[in-house]
Amino acid sequence: MADLTINQLNKDTKQNPAESSTHIATLVSHNDCIPETKSCFETLPNEILLYIASYLSLPEYLQAFFNLNQRFRSLAFEFISHARVSFNEDSLILNDYLPYIAHAVQAAHVDIQLVPNTFPATYSWSNLRSVILTDSIYFAATLNVQNSSVMHAIMSCLNIFQKCTPSSETNLELDNNQQIRTLLNMEPNLTIVRLTIDIWDEESLLCLCSITPNLASLRIFNLYSNDDDSSHSTIASHITSPTKLTELFIGNRGNFGIRLRSIQRLIECYRSSLEKLTLYIRAGKQKFYGQDLEALFRSCQCLKKFQFAIRYYDRHINMNQLVQQFLTDWWLHKDQPPVLVTYDLANEVFICSMPPFVNLNRQFLSDLLLWEINKKQVDEPNV
């Protein structure tokens, strides 16, 4: 009987796919058509089922399996506890399941526009440890809420970013000294541990760092600075020691310039704790010399790894002089990475640590004789 049923299902599904699901449901409702043994799918071990689930989005998994039986519901809770649950415009179906799964969520990724719907007071988030708040334009913040009220941590974070009100469509600049004082006098947010921010002026960034003492990782793109540096040192002095920042990424996109002094000031604030430092910079006409980079990296007391890729324009390229900058005892020490130096037909110099962390398959000259490395004896895995 089971074989006949399966054959009939296959036949009907091929003949009329639109009605196949209805027909299957009708057949399944008849006990004489279904053997009293588990399906092959149900006999799979939990490890395989969780592996299959990893290829599904959480809404897909919940819709497919959550209401099947207790075993699949338990697997859903296990899947949720090990996944970062994303709440965005494409996952609104999750709201239907929140009353049942909220207590199992340990990490949540939420667009700030959906915070009111995602975190109503009626749900229990008893196991929530981490919340990633994202704004599509300006920032992403990771909050450690293990020992904090979830909504209090979220509102505190959003309040901080609201104080840095966008003054135009292209920047988030603090527009007056009163706004700076307001931000510096805010209650510190102890839950923010990771930040990725885009298009920020240096004053705003230093203010933000001063009220996030538990910040451990910072990625900043398109950092710019006003010509007036008078307030920067004062703001930076509000960053208390010891600092906890261990990872710092500084980069820029497009035509946004970045000043070496701005990079130096930010690194000075965290030189006692930084362990990993990455620079990915298009500097325009501002030149980055080997001695400047050496001073930056050497100032970090706990640095374990650094990498950089820097491009700048130079009308009079002298490859010998460029390479000479990276032939000091410090750069040639075995603990420092090799440095590649090359340029393109538009007179743009490119220097980067090896192995490169960016794609070199670009417009650079194809003649490898014009690609110089400061260390002549380099182990193959490092190049």
Image: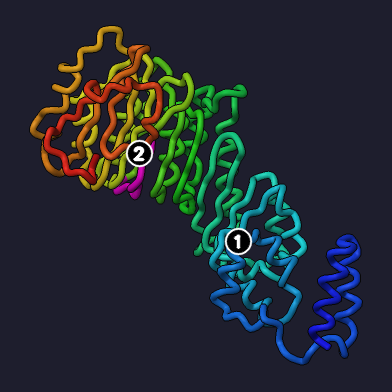
Three-letter amino acid code of the residue under disc 2: Phe
Q: CA distance from mark 1 to mark 2?
A: 28 Å
Where is residue 267 drawn, in percent x and y? 30, 35
- Residue at (59% x, 57% y) in the render: 108
| Mark 2 lies on residue | 357
Residue at image point 53% right, 29% down: 179
Residue in the image at 28% along x and 26% along y? 351
In this rendering, the answer to whether 50 lies above or below 266 is: below
> How many residues crowd around disc 1 within 10 Å: few (fewer than 14), some, or many (20 or more)?
few
Name the image quarter holding the N terminus.
Answer: bottom right
Marking on residue 125: none
- The x, y position of residue 20, in whole percent, is 87, 67
Residue range (magenta):
241-249
For residue 379, above or below residue 102: above
Residue occupying the far top of the picture? 315
Considering depth in this image, is 369 or 157 the residue closer to the camera?
369
Query: At label 1, which amino acid type do we have?
Result: Tyr
Which residue in the structure is indicated by mark 1?
55
Dot 1 lies on which element? loop
* Quadrant of the frame with the C terminus: top left
The answer to the question of whether label 1 and label 2 lie on touching residues, with beta carbons closer than 8 A, is no
The part of the image, by quadrant, that contains residue 22 is bottom right
